[in-house]
Image (cartoon, grey):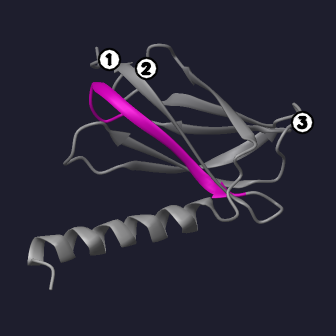
Amino acid sequence: MAPEGGRVRLKASLAACCCFAMACAGAAGDVTATWTVEPTPPSVEVAALVRCALEQRDGTPVIGARLRLDAHMTHPGMAPIVGDLIERSPGIYESRLKFSMAGSWALVVSGELVDGRRIVKQTEVTAVQPSG
């Protein structure tokens, strides 16, 4: 019989493998994301325009996706800032958000493409400035 620590590690490994397999199933790995944030650098409490351009591998814009934007501080303890991304032109999705603290943030786009595939793309904004 395996020691308790070994069983816990085994269960954790199995759970991680299942999550990885579920995340890969139906994922849009052939889609690329190009990010811009205006103003650059963004400032605390000033509405920033986040733009995410999505393209297929062949350069075709990804149109009609239903997307959400989550902004997370890169250290624990802060609630994320959440917003919808709106398609402004073919394959160009935008959202406005106000960063609540200076420092580094991770931006995560997640959602579903019109063909049902899931998408998750991430980038970092490392220079959010204090207000004023």
Badge 1 is on which residue?
129
Residue 57 within the magenta-colored segment of the rendering: no
Residue type, numbered disc 3? Thr
Assign a secondary structure to mark 2: loop
The majority secondary structure of the magenta stretch comes to: strand
Tell me if 36 is positioned left or right of 30 in this view.
left
Q: Position of residue 94 (x, y in %)?
A: 66, 37
Mark 3 or mark 1: whose residue is earlier in sequence: 3
Q: Nearer the viewer, residue 98 or 20?
A: 20
Residue type, numbered disc 2? Pro
Residue at 19% across, 48% down? 77
Badge 2 is on which residue?
42
Label count reads 3
Quadrant of the drawing holding the N terminus: bottom left
Assign a secondary structure to mark 3: loop
Residue 60 is marked as 3
The answer to which image quadrant residue 72 occupies is top left
Residue at 24% across, 46% down? 78
Q: Position of residue 84 (x, y in %)?
A: 59, 51
Mark 3 or mark 2: whose residue is earlier in sequence: 2
On screen, residue 62 above or below 13? above
Q: Nearer the viewer, mark 3 or mark 2?
A: 3
Q: Are marks 3 and 1 in contact (CB under 8 Å)?
A: no
Q: CA distance from mark 3 to mark 1?
A: 35 Å
Q: Position of residue 118 (x, y in %)?
A: 67, 59
Q: Are marks 2 and 1 in contact (CB under 8 Å)?
A: yes
Looking at this rendering, what residue extends furthest in the front direction? 1
Q: Nearer the viewer, mark 3 or mark 1?
A: 3
Residue at 27% across, 71% down? 10
* Disc 1 packing (10 Å; few <14; some 14–19; many ≥20): some
Residue type, numbered disc 1? Gln
Q: Which contiguous range is marked in magenta? A: 98-112
